[in-house]
Amino acid sequence: MTRRILRAKLRARWGNVAGLRVLGFGYATPFLGLFREEAERVFAFMPASQGVILWPADGPPAAALVEEDMWPLPDAAVDRILVVHGLEAARSAADLL
């Protein structure tokens, strides 16, 4: 029920993400599938302290294990970021943000 409510709120807030690059950090994968069909790219970064899981279950992997303050991306590489349980597990919220 919570996932359904939050997905509806995300969709209302972000609208159409066609052509955008969407990144989830932390435990965002339950919500990212909503955007896979329309976004240019959807991928998940999972903090080293949490561990990584295979995502998505169908298709090529789009998840990576990262250090919270060292993401392997150039500036402006992502249009939308969804952080779920990422701040509470961070060593330094300021460095993560």
Image (tube, helix red, strand yellow):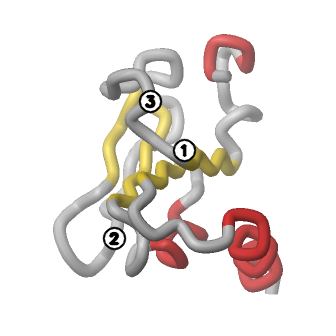
* Quadrant in which the C terminus appears: top right
Seen as rendered, the residue at the extreme left is 60
Mark 3 or mark 2: name the one nearer the start of the chain. Answer: 2
Tell which circle, 2 or 1, labels the residue nearer the N-terminal end. Answer: 1
Select label 3 or label 1 by which is in front: 3
Q: Which mark is residue 45?
A: none
Closer to us: 96 or 10: 10
* Residue 77, image x, y percentages: 38, 35
Disc 2 target residue: 56
Q: Residues within 10 Å of mark 2 (few under 14, many from 20)?
A: some
Q: Position of residue 27 (x, y in %)?
A: 58, 54
Label 1 neighbour load within 10 Å: few <14, some 14-19, many 20+: many
Please state which amino acid type lies under the numbered disc 2. Answer: Pro
Q: Earlier in the sequence, mark 3 or mark 1?
A: 1
Residue hosting label 3: 76
SS at circle 1? strand
Amino acid type indicated by mark 1: Phe
For mark 2, give the secondary structure: loop
Distance from Cα at disc 2 to Cα at disc 1 = 14 Å
Question: How many numbered circles does the render carry?
Answer: 3
Q: Residue, x 58% and y 73% (percent of image)? A: 16
Front-lying residue, 85 or 38: 38
Q: Where's residue 15, x and y in %?
A: 67, 71
Question: Horizontal placement of 84 versus 6: left or right?
Answer: left
Q: Are marks 2 and 1 in contact (CB under 8 Å)?
A: no
- Proximity of marks 3 and 1: CB atoms separated by less than 8 Å: no
For label 1, the residue is: 25
* Residue 34 to residue 89: above or below: below
Q: Residue placed at 64% from the left, 12% from the top?
A: 95
- Please tell me whether residue 51 is drawn above or below residue 44 in the rendered image: above
- Amino acid residing under circle 3: Ala
